[in-house]
Amino acid sequence: MGEDKHINKDDFKVNRRHFFSKLSAGIGTLALGSLMIPDLFKKGSGGLSQSGYTLGLPHFAPKAKRIIYLFQAGAPSQLESLDYKPLLTERMGEDLPESIRGGQRLTGMTSNQERFPLVGSYTGFKQYGQNGTWVSDYFPHIGKIVDEICIVKSMHTEAINHDPAITFLQTGNQISGRPSMGSWFSYGLGSENQNLPSFVVLTSRGKGNSQGLYSKLWSSGFLDSRHQGVLLRSGKDPVLYLNDPEGVTREDKREMLDNISDLNNQHYNEVLDDEIQSRIAQYEMAYRMQMSVPEVMDLKQEPESIIKLYGAEALIPGTYAANALLARRLAENGVRFIQLYHQGWDQHGNLPKEMSGQAMDVDQASAALVLDLKQRGMLEDTLVIWGGEFGRTNYCQGRFSPENYGRDHHPRSFSIWMAGGGVKQGLSYGETDEFGYNIIKDPVHINDFHATLLHLFGIDHEQLTFKYQGRRFRLTDVAGNVVNDLLA
Amino acid sequence: MNQKQYILLIGLLGILFLGLWFKAKNNENATVKGNQIEKLPPEISFNFHVKPILSDKCFACHGPDGNKRKAGLRLDVEQDAKAELTENPGKYAIMPGSVENSELIHRIVSEDPSIMMPPPDSHLKLTSDEKEILRKWIDQGAKYERHWAFITPVLSSMPEISSRDWPLNEIDYFVLNKMEEIGLNPSNEASPEKLLRRLSLDLTGLPPTISEVKKFTTSETLNYDEIVDYYLSKPAYGEKMARDWMDVSRYADSHGYQDDSYRTMWPWRDWVIHAFNENMPFDQFLTWQLAGDLLPDTDKEKILATGFNRNHPITQEGGVIDEEYRSTYVSDRTNTLGKGILGLTFECAKCHDHKYDPFSQKDYFQVYAFFNNVNEKGLQMDAVQAKNRKYYADAPFISIEDEDLDGILSFIKKTDTTDLKVMVMNDSARRKAFVLARGNYDAPAEEVTASTPEAILEFPEEYPRNRLGLAKWLTDPNNPLTARVYVNRLWASLFGLGIVETIEDFGSQGALPSHPELLNWLSVEFMESGWDIKHILKIMVSSATYRQSSSSNPALKEIDPENIYLARGPRFRLNAEEIRDYVLSTSGLLNEQVGGPSVKPYQPPGLWEETNAGGNRGILTTYVEDSGDKLYRRSLYTFWKRTLPPPSMAIFDAPNRDLCEVRRQKTNTPLQALALQNDVQVLECAKVLSSQISEEDLPDEEAVRSLFQHVLLRQPSDEEMDLLVGYHQECVDKFDSNKEDAIKLLEVGNAEPGEEKQTETAALMMVAQVLYNLDETITKE
């Protein structure tokens, strides 16, 4: 038992009350309860019955249990990755026809440009897999797993600048303040483990032109801050304030916690405030995290074959490859939502050189993650997503040259890929016109994308709501349709 | 509604509340709870029983939003609700007095998915109690009432109570009256130590000093009145009040958005501290911030105050569309006025008519029009350009010259000779204002002129249609919201819960007041005192209600677990800033200097560096920690970078300051446990305090006792002493046999550890860490 003895016997009663008093606030209390007293559901008799889980969730059988979102911050060009457009090479340097642009608003970076010369991909494309899917030469490893993944070429968004676009993708709204996707999942589905947060964020940086990241992207907004994403950092203090000070051993810490608990319990008997019991439980959870986080982050435990699969960079903390491998370990340990950010995809200029570098960072490790999950039987219920916040223009920004060019932001169409977790394998979904500018088939709006993700987890996106300031908020706000064609 | 009707209404409500759980909480149980239906009074109240149901379950399709209205039925307006159904001639949704002939009732009891209400696809359901309330209400004549919060508050007479010995002032009459109805008794007064600690924390955000505790709790002639005045007159009072206002005004030291560069708004923050300390009347405080530049006798101080409306985030992302962002800023000011000052969710009416409250989209843009004439740009400069400037403000701004500091701006603690500019408001770019279709900047529709929502208070003809007129309208004695919202917020800061729990929303979907007459009384008292903030705070903290012990008991916990009826004193966790300040203050490290540029205390290294845009853009890319006593300033001076707020604050529920916030969560998480155990600042404070005590050469037991008194500001109980003395001995033994550990432990933080008595200090430091991690330490009780 060890640690458990310090949880007061009355905990259960106490938290049960707390629980019921909050039940009506939303199913999130399940998640809340499970983080407060992680083994609440495991105590058997006297525990909240399993019917607690049937408070409407899941709404139907889920396919996926967890997400690893490989977010490519800055917006990688679809035209040099997944959306092959030979016409752009044929008509290299010609102006984008006005009929295609169709009044699309432009950013301040290209709105003063006199011409919009089309530019074809500098890198070549090859066909892979059973369907001969085109993938650019920047992503040979993705090419090799093309039969495992589902490519969506018809994503579109409303924002044209990074901040609102990332915020929109992560929270369903361009304006800051809404909970991020990971927080919604944590709120709706709770934690699957007792020792780690349910929503974890990992960041890495490529050499390409990059945009800053902001903690609001993993903020829980108006949801309880237990659902906030926890940033795991690569240094010696992976979770803020995780390490005990020098000179304090693990045994010392245990002793200290016991004294804190005893004094807190004495005080509880005097004032009868349940928050005190909750705090005692939080200290125990923190104590467990101090063990479990360093353990899960110790990539040296991985065999050589795995390091080889992800690439040698996987042993360099803070790289994308290391984070991808770490993501798998976190998934194994029951973390619900693992969000990677790789910065550096904002190629307004110097695209060929920068993009090949960015792709080198992520290609092998992203493919490795899919293969690794598959070989462990985890791909079935783990959804992997790779993509940025919008697309890039088919015309050149700045000085035009076929060898060195840039692309501006393009909200009307972009490409992502997904794997596992109940999405169709080997599918290419949606289509853009031959200019790679407008979607001509099966558009997927951000709201649709979110609705589909929730669906994979057995959640009706219209029913996962939280009432705040008198309004029931949803990740999908007031829109969104599940894209059934993507479902396996 | 005239005064007579109002008094009638209040009287009626008084009867209706009898024994009833009317507290509509901000959750799905918005109305009467399960088994309490039999306790429903003979007569149903529209405002307290019916409206919460209609609003929450019906208004989305049958409410104020004209575009989304179904079947032409509108239930929020009496006339429309009782009219013949346009799509169902000869039928009526509500036929007063006739349940049989009221289509509404047929629909809510039906189980036929094609006609039932709310419809299945809304995922909304009425409970059987709610249906019963609606049935009874129609049976009784289906009377409508104006929304309670839009009725101008008038003084209500003191309610009847039986225990006449208990009240110390008017507040207690209202509170006791409610307690007696429910069958609760007030708690005893808190011990002098607890009460003093509570008072000091509430009025200054800091714990009392050890010497204050001695002076105020041992004196035979303890004069509570003087103690209150003492704390209200401390400069720390203004700091405490300013900190709350910084959330409302979304104050930060950075611009926000992705590049998030530096800005110098801190002189505005210092003005707020100054204004609170001068006890500037609240109506003037608002007027200066909204329209100081438009006052006939305007001066630099009044213009500085208008920085309030330039505190919003400003983008420096190259290539954005200028008008898109300018429009966002104007909306931000509009929303802040709604949430921060009027307690209304204006922003819900930006893209369409409000779903629940009587504000149209046109109303929204009429308010928007007040803030639309600033000579500003959406994108003044990008982060690269900003880096090459000598000052950190986007036009319009005022320059603060050295000579100003000798005059009315003497409260500004300018530390060097750099060009100091502060962003302010002006009206020098007159623009036409339009309803923006779906809220989009590039979809102007009908042109509008500046005005305010009629449902609250008609905009008087004689007021100018500019921000000054807006300020006059806000502070007009007939405005039903401004005073109510502010006194409610003050109340919530003392008692944990507001009288209206949803302090950000006084609209239809907000909570109903637990003590409506008390709220009215406080609002009127506040206005009649000349919007005197210290006066109203003093009344609150002098009440017997406030002075009760916060300990609960099993019976009370059963009946009123959340302390809505105030049969005990408040008990809740301190906020982020207060926790850090508490630790600094009790250890003696706190630097009490008031005002000046924000400072950079300890922060785990690397946070800014890991998330910046690559080091070449903007100026807040690396965090350079301050040194010396700048590390120990009060937390409201901690540098606030929006994209990465100080982590020790964010962990304790501080908002990121992107938007106006009036209510922080009070969570309890493992990350908080880690922060209190391992934040360098807390450890250093434990060390410094322990080092001081070990130098006094006290016997072990006395040293532990002294430590306890310093941290918890009360005497320990025998049990507590037993436990701590035992723990202390274990730590002494540990460090005696392992001096290396003691030396390592004492290296934490910049403050030099003493050369002597290292094991003694280290052992005490472990005890201090236990004390700083107690629930009681970080809780106001």
Image: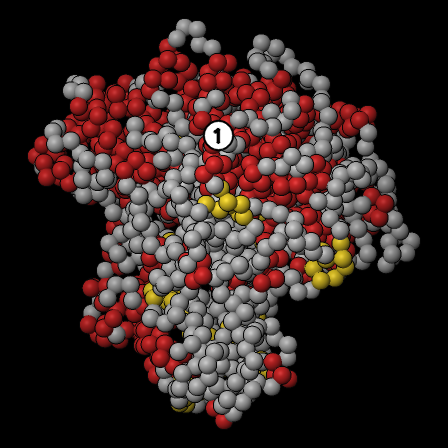
Front residue of B124/A308: it is A308
Give how far across and how far down residue A366 sits, in percent.
35, 73
Give how far across and how far down residue B15 sits, in percent.
73, 25
> Looking at the picture, does residue A29 appear above or below residue A5?
below
Q: Residue at x 32, y 38 (%)?
A: B630
Is B256 left or right of B715, judged from the image as shown? right
Front residue of A195/B202: it is B202
Q: Residue at x 46, y 45 (%)?
A: B420
- Chain to which the residue tagged by mark 1 belongs: B
> Looking at the picture, does residue B149 appear above or below residue A424?
above
Quadrant housing the N terminus of chain A: top left
Farthest-out residue, left: B737
Give how far across and how far down residue B462 sits, in percent.
79, 38
Q: Is residue A446 visible?
A: no
- Residue type at the position of mark 1: Gly
> Looking at the picture, does residue B124 appear above or below residue A318?
above
